Amino acid sequence: MDLDERINQVLSQCEQTLKSISSHQDLEDIKVQFLGRKGLIRDLFSQLSQLSDSEKKHYGESINKLKMEIESKISQKGESIQSKIQTSPENQVFDYSLPGFPYSIGKKHPFTLICEELYQIFRSMNFMVVEDREIEDEYHNFDALNIPKWHPSRKLNDTFFLTDGSVLRTHTSPVEIRTMEKISPPIRMVTIGGRCYRRDASDATHSAVFHQIEGLVVDENINFCHLSEILSEMMRGVFGKPVEIRFVPSYFPFVEPGAETLISCPFCKGDGCSVCKNSGWIELGGSGMTHPQVLRNVNIDPTKYQGFAFGWGVERLAMIKYGIDDIRLFFENNLSFLEQF
Ligand code: FA5
């Protein structure tokens, strides 16, 4: 074998051996085998003495080149062994002195916040806070509330009916009936954040699932001024300042007279802004004096007792209080939204 062949053979031998090893110790052995005092490179250099001067020059350069190439390959292999060692899980070093990741403190959902406020406000006015079922029968959701059989809200495209004929309650007004069935007047009750269901298309102000606050007072000598006072007090509590209430006559079969209830816009004080769509007023829900037939349905004598009731959207109230422009945000669990409160 001439020297050229031997040089190529040593290079490929080195490459093969490097491929087969994975430890620094093996690498040290290879260094000795190829670059050591009795190594293969030395051996090649020793063969130069038998050559002519011109051959010495030629092969001397070739062997030097081979030596540098082998040194570089050994050093690359060393780096690759080191990086494998560092990234293997059993060699990960855990530094116990590093600071930990801080826990971010959870925040209350704006819906929870407003419900807690409403709870405080009504407890301070001595209202009984009640809850009732979300799956209702037609009687309590409609009939007992004087809602006629032909009323559009009873249609399949407005209400979720279950196969057994019961309904997902479309409002919290059936809680009034259930309370009056159980308790005799005087009654001061409120249900806060009761879940309701309607087949409404979802948009910025409507959702198929939403929540209402429903209040009912039944006693002797109850009149519309009492209703107005309680609603004003509720608004003063929520917004922390007096808010004007406006009643616009409206029809709900279970109250007479009935009204859509508006508040003066707490942001622009009635001057007009984007929240109140420049009207100065914001509509929050219905209210009115309990219809005598509703009282009769629960065996309360309407000649002796009168009642007033209101039912408002809780998300709508929270949207106004917290400046939220889309009801869908309440249900999306979007962290960047929730962290604002
Ligand atoms: C009622 O539900 C009546 N039960 C309210 C009532 C109670 C009137 C007692 C008189 C006496 P209405 O359908 O208007 O009324 O709903 C009341 C409020 O619930 C609305 O003003 C709105 O704030 C909220 N609401 C109704 N539908 C939706 C919906 N799909 N998404 C979000 N909020 C809604």
Image (cartoon, rainbow, N blue to C red):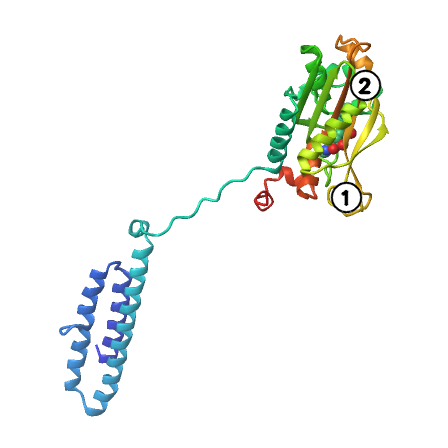
Most extreme residue toward the left is 38
Q: Amino acid at mark 1?
A: Lys
Dot 1 falls on a residue whose secondary structure is loop
Residue at figure coordinates x 71%, y 25% from the top left: 214
48 and 101: which is toward the camera: 101
Q: Amino acid at mark 2?
A: Ile
Residue 201 spot, x, y in % from top left: 74, 35
Query: What mark, if any, has residue 147 been given in the picture?
Result: 2
Disc 2 crowd, CA 10 A, few/some/many (<14, 14-19, 20+): some
Disc 1 crowd, CA 10 A, few/some/many (<14, 14-19, 20+): some
7 and 120: which is toward the camera: 120
Residue at figure coordinates x 23%, y 61% from the top left: 24
> Vertical placement of 233 versus 41: above or below?
above
Quarter of the image where the N terminus is located: bottom left
Quarter of the image where the C terminus is located: top right
Could you tell me how many numbered marks the image carries? 2
- Marks 1 and 2: in contact by CB < 8 Å? no
Residue 274 spot, x, y in % from top left: 76, 47
Residue bearing mark 1: 269
Tell me the mark number nearer the camera, choosing from 2 and 1.
1
Using the rendered view, name the quadrant where residue 219 is placed.
top right
Q: Specify which label sits upstream in the sequence, 2 or 1.
A: 2
Left or right position of 145 against 322 = right
Left or right position of 337 against 231 = left
Using the rendered view, name the quadrant where residue 290 is placed.
top right
- Quadrant for ligand 1 reads top right
Q: CA distance from mark 2 to mark 1?
A: 36 Å
Residue 313 visible, this orientation:
no
Residue at figure coordinates x 67%, y 33% from the top left: 237
Residue at figure coordinates x 80%, y 11% from the top left: 302
